[in-house]
Image (cartoon, rainbow, N blue to C red):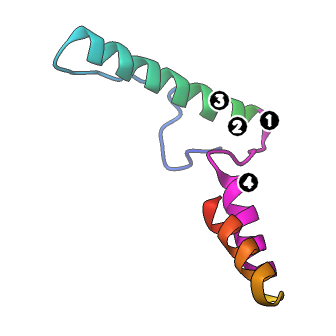
């Protein structure tokens, strides 16, 4: 099971405190989104990288590729990698 050290309880309580109702609504929405993500990962047993992961991987690849080029091409590819 995912939480090996935890008890076998099927439900938990989360108590939220905040300065106003707008803030509490935002916290509740964020927690709901987070729990939904964890649920989907556990159900599908897979994760798709997000949050700029593709851009970062491409930037690393292009930076390495730029080092194999010469002169102005190297500068152009390296700057494009930096912009990602």
Q: Position of residue 4 (x, y in %)?
A: 56, 49
For residue 57, side relative to residue 15 (left or right): right
Crowd tier of the residue under label 4, counting other residues whose Cα lies within 10 Å: few below 14, some 14–19, many 20 or above: few
Circles 1 and 2: CB atoms closer than 8 Å: yes
- Of pointers 4 and 3, the one earlier in the residue sequence: 3
Is residue 21 inside the magenta stretch?
no
**Residue name at image x 69 percent, y 67 percent:** 81
Q: Is residue 69 above or below residue 43?
A: below
Secondary element at tag 3: helix
Q: Which residue matches tag 2?
A: 41
Q: Which residue matches tag 1?
A: 44
Q: Position of residue 11 (x, y in %)?
A: 49, 22
Crowd tier of the residue under label 2, counting other residues whose Cα lies within 10 Å: few below 14, some 14–19, many 20 or above: few
- Of pointers 1 and 3, the one earlier in the residue sequence: 3
Crowd tier of the residue under label 3, counting other residues whose Cα lies within 10 Å: few below 14, some 14–19, many 20 or above: few
Secondary element at tag 2: helix
For residue 54, side relative to residue 28 (left or right): right
The Cα–Cα distance between marks 1 and 3, rounded to whole angstroms, is: 9 Å
Secondary element at tag 1: helix
**Residue name at image x 70 percent, y 37 percent:** 41
- Of pointers 2 and 4, the one earlier in the residue sequence: 2
Circles 2 and 3: CB atoms closer than 8 Å: yes
Residue 39, disc: 3
In the foreground, 41 or 70 = 70
- Of pointers 1 and 4, the one earlier in the residue sequence: 1
Q: Which residue matches tag 4?
A: 54
The Cα–Cα distance between marks 2 and 3, rounded to whole angstroms, is: 6 Å
């Amino acid at each position: 099971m995912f939480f090996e050290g935890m008890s076998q309880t099927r439900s938990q309580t989360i108590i939220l405190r905040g300065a106003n109702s707008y803030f509490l609504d935002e916290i509740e929405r964020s927690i709901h989104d987070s729990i939904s993500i964890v649920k989907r990962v556990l159900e599908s047993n897979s994760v798709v990288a997000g949050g700029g992961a593709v851009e970062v991987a491409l930037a690393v690849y292009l930076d390495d590729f730029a080092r194999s080029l010469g002169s102005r091409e190297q500068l152009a590819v390296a700057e494009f990698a930096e912009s990602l």
